[in-house]
Structures are given as C-alpha cells and as structure tokens.
Image: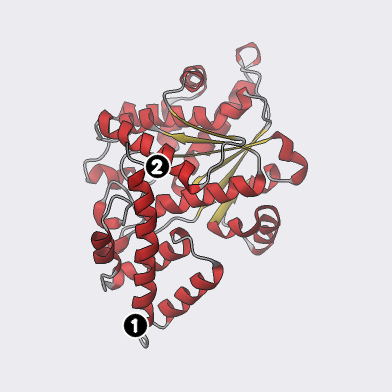
Amino acid sequence: MSIDAESAAILTERLGPTAVRFTHTDDALWVLHPDRRESLAIVTGFGPTNAPTAGTLSVMLGAVELQRHLGVSMTVVISDLGAWNSRNVSWSALVRVRDQMLAFLVELGLGPHKAELRSHLEHDNLVRAGRIARYLSRADFQEHRESLLGLYAEHGLLGSETGVVVDSLYTVADVLGPFDNGASNVLMVSGMEEAYFTDLARLVLQRQANAGELGLGWSGRIGGLYFRVLEGLAGYPKMSKSIPASSIHLNMTQAEIVDRVMDEAESSQAALLSAIELSSGWDAVDVARAREAFADRVLRPESWRQARREFCRSFAQFAGIWQRCAR
C-alpha cells in the first residue's frame, strides 16, 4: 500500500533520509522494527540486460544508502540466468553487463561488510529454486506477474512463456534465501512493478509451512519496500533498459546525455525532474533548487535549463565510473 503520513514518519525514523526514496510498503514496518534488526536480512537485485538507466541507478544508490544505514545482511543479485530466460539478450552480453554491474556497485560504495553480491549462477540458489517449485502452480505465475509484460512483448523483448516463469522462480528463490541461512525476517526491496516476487515468495513460505513432512522448515515473515518508479522519457511509464527512447543510461557519451536531457519536449520534463531527485547524487538543497526551477520553467525557462545542464554533468560522472568498470 502507498505510504501514508504516519507510516512515512516511522519509516524516516528507521531509515533516515533514505526513506524518501520509497512510495509503497507491504509489511515492511513490521520487519524493520528495531527489536527485529538482528534477525533481518535484505534482498534486492538488478537485471543485466543493458547499462543501468537513471531509474536503475536510483535504486542502486538507494540500496547503498539502505545498507549503510541499517548495517544488516544484504544480498544483491544480478539476475543473469533470469534475464537469459525472460529477455531476448545474448548470453555474452548478459555476462559482460553482469560483471560490470558487480564492479559498479562496489564503486558506488556497497561495502563488503554484511553485503553479498552474486548472480544467479550460484549453486545454493539453483537448488533452492528446484526445491520451491513444488509449492507453486502455473496459475500462481499467471496471477502474479510483471505489469509491463505486455509492453515488453510489443517491443519483441520477451523470451518464452516458460522462460518468464523460470525467471520468476529464480528470483523467488533469491527472496527466500535468507531463511536458508537463519534469518527470520526478510525485507524485499525493489521497484513496485516487482512486488509480485514478494507475493510469490509469501505463497511458498506459507505453503511449505503447512506441508508437514514435505515442508522445508522455514518460518518467518517477508516485508516489501518499494522504490519510487522513475517514469520514462517521452511519456513511457518507466525508464526501461529495453526501450531506449524511454531512458538515459550509463553507456551514453556525454554528448548523448546532453542531447537527451536538454530536449525541450514537455512529455519528458517531469521524468527529468524525477531523475534529478533520485539519481543525481545531489544533496537536499540542490534537489530543492531543481524542483523550484521545474515549477517555474514556463516563466523562468533558463533556470530549469541550468538545472538540467548540471544534471548532465552529474550523470556523466556516474557514466564515467560505469564505463571504467568494464573489463
């Protein structure tokens, strides 16, 4: 559910400034209670289909902030096998972007203390995926699926129907992984469009608990905390790596970034403000100044142009780091 004023206050108390990055919570406040901190583990992840967009960068920055603030165990998964099954991208490209993402997250500051960075090529998770499949039906995957599948299908980006299910199975196994390692509370952190993974993981947790001798011995609770979705340029619902016109991404040259960000099309301006708020790395004062410039852009267009120029420089700096992380 969307975060109301009371929940926002509690979330800010528990997460500090990082709380403003989230728009929806699903039992997250319960698992984030200070008394449960010792038994809490966080799971998040990224698809390596292409270079991070501003939207993906915003989630990466949020994950780093969250780990620094809470100091609890965090698993960050680069879903290479999942993407291989659900998207039409070559394996060599997925491996290249996977390795680059892992290095980039370290450069952003995701510390080795209590943080595990891995891909889907991890034995324990593959075994876990095989063990949990018995608790899910085809109808479960049809009911709980990504809301943008239709959009991706229109653009010819999806793998097979079975592949999409396999992708979901691997990711549900990711969410449930901490229960294998002794956690009793798990916080799934993602975009709102990925909330279905949390729902599927809860089905498995409940069904195995009710399965008697056919259960896995897991018990606990899963909370979901969902990042604000960064809307796409040109009117697209979100910035997607798979739909180039919707996004700016870290493989762009500085000239390409400037060309996209400085475009005057009104359909992109709100998305550019969101990109500044979430993926610029600016402090609160500079972000507030950009909001004022956006609000006054009709009467004072040059102030908004200047804010976008500054964002071009900031985003280009992240792009430089990303490109240096390539092998």
From the top left corner, tell me how far across and down residue 274 is, in percent: 43, 64
> Hey, which quadrant is residue 27 in on the image?
top right
Q: Which amino acid does label 2 sit on?
A: Glu
Most foreground residue, 4 or 256: 256
Q: What residue type is labelled 1?
A: Glu
Is residue 29 something one can see in this rendering? yes
How many marks the image carries: the answer is 2
In the depicted structure, whether residue 224 falls above or below residue 87: below
Q: Quick check: 137 left or right of 23? A: left
Is residue 145 something one can see in this rendering? no
Most foreground residue, 103 or 206: 103
**Callout 2: SS:** loop
The label shown at residue 4 is: none
Q: Quick check: 218 left or right of 81? A: right
The label shown at residue 302 is: 1
Q: Quick check: 42 left or right of 262? A: right
Quadrant into which the C terminus falls:
top left
Q: Which colour scheme is used?
A: secondary structure
Write down the residue under mark 2. 146
From the top left corner, tell me how far across and down residue 92 is, in percent: 26, 30
Gap between marks 2 and 1 measured at Cα: 39 Å
Q: Residue at x 40, y 42 (%)?
A: 146
Residue farthest to the top, as pictured: 213
